[in-house]
Image (cartoon, grey):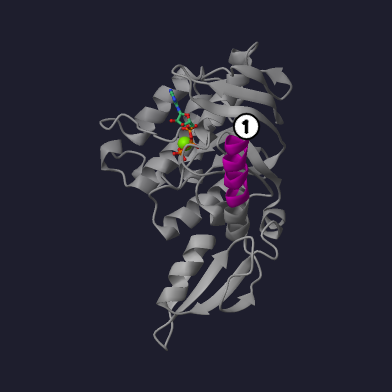
Amino acid sequence: MDVVIRNVSKVYRGGVKALDGVSLSVGKGMFGLLGPNGAGKSTLLRLVATLDTPTAGQVTVGGLDCRKHPGEVRRRLGYLPQAFAAFRRLTALEFLDYVGLLKGLDNPRRGREIGELVEQVGLARAARARIGTFSGGMLQRLGIAQALLGSPPLLIVDEPTAGLDPEERVRFRNLLADLGQDRTVVLSTHIVADVERACGDLALLFEGRVAFQGPPLTLAERASGRVWEVATDREGYERVRLSHQVVASRAAADGGFLLRVVGDKTPPGEVRAATPTVEDGYLATIRSAAVDCVSKAAAF
Ligand SMILES: Nc1ncnc2c1ncn2[C@@H]1O[C@H](COP(=O)(O)OP(=O)(O)OP(=O)(O)O)[C@@H](O)[C@H]1O
Ligand SMILES: [Mg+2]
């Protein structure tokens, strides 16, 4: 189910411009949406989920305009919001039955799908427990199950792994990757590793604009020639920090520091060029976009 976003802007009441001329094309498989806090990720996902409308531009899902055909688009998508909360006193089965009813699923299809879904997301044993007793990971699994009811070809998930422990995060990521084999999954996250491991294509949003779209490895290449390992003392560390982004710092045996830094120029000191990772590409791209913003503001 293709999602096409054409020149979309969103200005909230009060004047915040959350999106500014965003164009993206999303096909089958898993698509990652990265960006710092406030970049506009949730806003964009809400527009695709037909929960809000753009101030300018157009969003289509499977060729259907979200503004003109919100009902039809809604029937084709499942959505897990950033702050998913479910009725604490209901059991997982009761909650899913309720959501299934809202989605217009008749029995026996509703019962059958719910049974299959709790198995698929690994909640079968907890299906009759009250939601109020669930851990964060279990709650996110329930969130995915409710989004998947009705087998929508498009799944939109907004930061589903925030707050999960590493093991549960990887399990959840694998579940999403499985789901992405025969549908479109749009995943927003701060966790670069999740996108790197699971998504064939990604977009990086910064201050409401697309700073990058492409495969994770191409993002890593953005930092090519801009990543170094530096051996330095405390004074050198303070100097490098002013001109470069320190990605990692480790105390060395000689009392100094081993740093990994991203920047535009070779840093001073004992340096060695490093192979960029996707996280380096993310940081280098954000850095360039931030510099662009500052120089545009200065020219203005
Ligand atoms: N309902 C709203 N009314 C006014 N401003 C809003 C509203 N929702 C979001 N914003 C603003 O729009 C901008 C983008 O917010 P959004 O929630 O889309 O970012 P995000 O990338 O999802 O951030 P995070 O990573 O923190 O979830 C922010 O400046 C935010 O304060
Ligand atoms: Mg958000």
Residue 33 percent coordinates (x, y): 59, 42
Q: Which residues are magenta?
A: 286-300
Q: Nearer the viewer, residue 259 or 191?
A: 259
Q: Is residue 122 left or right of residue 203?
A: left
Residue 41 can be seen in this image: yes
Give yes or no for residue 114 being in the magenta stretch.
Answer: no
Q: Residue at x 43, y 59 (%)?
A: 166
**Element marked by disc 1:** strand
Residue 259 percent coordinates (x, y): 50, 73
| Residue type of the residue flagged with mark 1 | Leu
Residue 149 can be seen in this image: no
Say which residue label 1 marks.
Answer: 154
Q: Residue at x 49, y 50 (%)?
A: 172
Q: Is residue 259 left or right of residue 185?
A: left
Asked if 33 appears above or below 11 in the picture, the reply is: below
Q: Give the quadrant of the N terminus.
A: top right
